[in-house]
Amino acid sequence: MRYDVPLLAKLLAIVGFGILYIPVMIMMIYSFNSSKLVAVWAGFSAKWYRELWTDDILLSALYKSLLIGISSSTISTFFGLFIAIAFVRFSAFRGRLTLSLVASAPLVMPEAVTGLSMLLLFIAMETTFGWPSGRGLDTIMIAHATFGMCFAAVVIQTRLRDMDRYLEEAARDLGERQPFVFISITLPLIFPSIIAAWLLSFTLSFDDLVIASFVSGPGSSTLPIVIFSKIRLGVSPEINAIATLMILTISAMVLMGSVLMLRREDRKNPTQL
Amino acid sequence: MAPFICIKDISKKYGNLSAVDNVSFNLDKGELFSLLGPSGCGKTTLLRILAGFETTTNGSFEIDGVNMTNVDPADRPVNIMFQNYALFPHMTVFENICYGLRRTSLSKSEINSRVEELLELVRLSGMSKRKPKTLSGGQKQRVALARALARRPKLLLLDEPLAALDKKLRSETQFELCKIQEQLGTTFIVVTHDQEEAMTLSTRIGVMNDGKLIQLGTPKEIYEQPQTTFVADFVGEISFFEAVVKERKNTHWLLQAAVPIHVSSDFNLVVGQKVKLALRPEKIMLTSKPTGKINEFQVDIVDWAFFGAGTQYRVIGPEDVKLKLYQSHNQPSQSHVPTLKTGFVNFSPEAIIILQR
């Protein structure tokens, strides 16, 4: 269906998108600035990108961020899947309400609160049974996996809820046992949402600064922490370059996630002949 | 000999609510049985109990002498065709149909030939590589049927098999379904709320309401000898009126409603008894002048609707007796009577149904 968009609506849309994206564009443009001064344009150059490549601190932070991102999002997706199944497939069980509150609270809780409570937990655990000894990559990973899990559960839940329950019954009726029904029917059908959930938790982990700064220890600074500390010493175009790369990576992942979620919509409304 | 399918005292309670209330019936091998009832009458719950997806509060279910009550759905020689077909969207037509065969002892070539056979049966040969998404509603329905038949079940359950199809396709598919059922000799139980569908498909019909099986019989019995008001009203069009039994004449009972009415002497009636009468619209004749026949009285024509093959009238007789009647246009000269304001109706004493409840 096509309809004419009123002029005012168009204008508002342009202003809105402008406010959102013009700063980002400017930042991207200045990442190619040859001058050391961030705000003064002195000609085109890709030297900040070359410099990034030789900056060991940044590279090691990037490596840590990727490591944490990949492992924590894998854990969150795994547990998120089970939470989603518990909510959608088991209509009533004891503690369902509690679980649903607990599972969705981190979605709305301020990151500083999550970070601080995680930190207190780790300290308490360390004094009680000696693990984790100090804060490091493992504590960041656990913290990220914990809040990523909630997002993953929400994403997978939506898809699972849309799935026709009769499909599983049909498979059982045709002689398949419960675990194989899950593998041959449910899993393939919710797979796009599992990928989307993974991408979402990875993105959340990859650009998290607040929680990571609470639960990181010496030598475990992630990319956002390094960038933030660099900014405190003054903004260099190098930051623009790395921010540009991060934005491109994350937008690519978000885009992939949305495409996967859109395919889900397609399946929901199959074209009737 | 024990009946092929024996359903005995099956009940399903949700708290105080009875979804299925003491339903019992037996089926012979190769029957096409319909469970007919309005939505919420428990027919789908009963079907799901038979498939094994719902537990029963009490009662038992046997096929061929084997008790199925505690058998897992995967192990029952029963398959179900879901109302929305429940085709696996990520699998091709071929994969859908052979899904139930993978766990059997059949070899690969046997599976292939069985699927080909089934595709031919439902006239979908050459479609095996298609995904369900690319099929029309009728084709999906046929894939679902083939998939449900693949394991050669002893009993096939069909949940509103034709509800998702448009009217024209529905009547075609109806006859096709009957043909396939006859060809295979599989026992079918069809759940439907569409009385026309139940009438054309089945060898026998069970009418359900409020979880109870109210009447069981052939389509003709259900239509011509309904035992309760509910069955009479649910199956086909009908008019009701009350009367009191006055006297026994030699060939007929004479009843007093707003007008004297003669009914067949076959009924067991007592003088003074109050009864509820029912009359099918096509059994009533409408004429512009009195004919002098039995059971004739004058009516006002309130409303009429032209149906092509006939015309339906709503008329009011003495003391506000409301009747629906249907005049077939089977005579070329016969014009329908919408120009009239009043007319005369008559009906034979055999046309009257006396309801027990």
Image: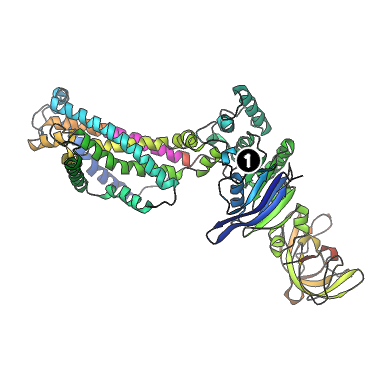
Depth order, front residue of B15/B276: B15
Which is the main secondary structure of the residues drawn in magenta? helix
User: Would you say residue A252 sits in the magenta stretch?
Assistant: yes
Depth order, front residue of B67/A27: B67
In this picture, is B211 found above or below A175?
below
Res A207 → quadrant: top left
Instruction: Assign the N terminus of chain B to one quadrant of the image.
Output: top right
Residue type at mark 1: give it: Val
The image's colour scheme reads rainbow
* Count of numbered circles on the image: 1
Residue A102 spot, x, y in % from top left: 31, 50
Residue B198 spot, x, y in % from top left: 70, 50
Q: Is residue B74 left or right of residue B278?
A: left
Q: Secondary structure at mark 1?
A: strand
Q: Is residue B135 left or right of residue A83?
A: right
Label 1: how many residues lie within 10 Å, few (<14), some (14-19) or many (20+)?
A: many
In this picture, is B279 found above or below A221?
below
- Looking at the rendering, the stretch of residues picked out in magenta corresponds to A250-266
Instruction: Assign the C terminus of chain B to one quadrant of the image.
Output: bottom right
Residue furthest right as drawn: B250
Q: Is residue B266 visible?
A: yes
List the residue tagged with mark 1.
Answer: B78
Residue A249 spot, x, y in % from top left: 26, 31
Residue A209 spot, x, y in % from top left: 19, 39
Depth order, front residue of A38/A91: A91
Which chain does the residue under circle 1 lie in? B
Q: Is residue B37 visible?
A: no
User: Would you say residue A6 sits in the magenta stretch?
Assistant: no
In this picture, is B270 found above or below A86?
below
